Image: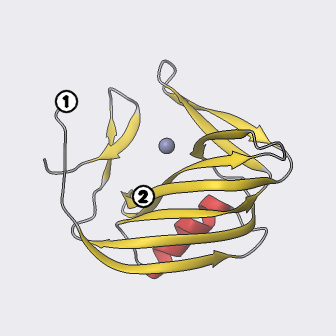
Amino acid sequence: MEHRIERFVKGDSQLIRLKPESDLLETLNNLVERVGIEVGVISGIGSVGPVNIGYYDFNKKEYRKNHFKGIYELVSLMGNISVKDNKPFCHCHIVIGDKDGKVYGGHLLPGTIVKVGEFHIDVLKGTPPERIFDVTTGLHLWNLKL
Ligand code: ZN
């Protein structure tokens, strides 16, 4: 497989405070669809719990779900927005920290609940990359031009 790259121009920057008790991934997906953002990057911090984090098992080609009860610092969320199944799709990874400062991280899954959420979206201008199923990895990957 070749490396692939595509250029985008920076558009708007948006700051977003999410409502407590909302599902983090579902809310981000609904928000970008409602506002019409099809390509961009997301970052965020705050507090979350309970938390569902995925670990992709390349042998089984499926996500293993790690569930965390209680409330954690959302030390970092980073992700991107592209298009999957004809609608905007957020792919995010998170790092959470417990009361002792131990951190856990991985792929953000539904069922992660916001306590406090401060997010930043940088909208990008250009043709949105589409996620296409990749047989080798079992994942939906970007169809970037080159
Ligand atoms: Zn991921």
- Residue shown at the point (42%, 79%) measured from the top left: 13
- Determine whether, in the image, residue 56 is placed left or right of residue 24: left
Which residue in the protein does label 1 denote?
Answer: 1
Which residue in the protein does label 2 denote?
Answer: 80
- Determine whether, in the image, residue 130 is placed left or right of residue 140: left
- Residue shown at the point (64%, 77%) measured from the top left: 17
Residue 45 on image: x %, y % = 63, 63
Residue 87 bears which disc, if any?
none
Distance Cα–Cα, label 1 vs label 2? 22 Å
- Residue shown at the point (65%, 54%) measured from the top left: 75
Asked if residue 138 is positioned above or below residue 118 in the image, the reply reads: above
- Tell me which label, 1 or 2, sits earlier in the chain: 1
Residue 16 on image: x %, y % = 58, 78
- Determine whether, in the image, residue 67 is placed left or right of residue 107: right
Is there a contact, CB below 8 Å, between mark 1 and mark 2?
Answer: no
Quadrant of the frame with the N terminus: top left
Whether disc 1's CB lies below 8 Å from ligand 1 is answered no
Residue at far left of view: 146
Q: Amino acid at mark 2?
A: Asn
Q: Amino acid at mark 1?
A: Met
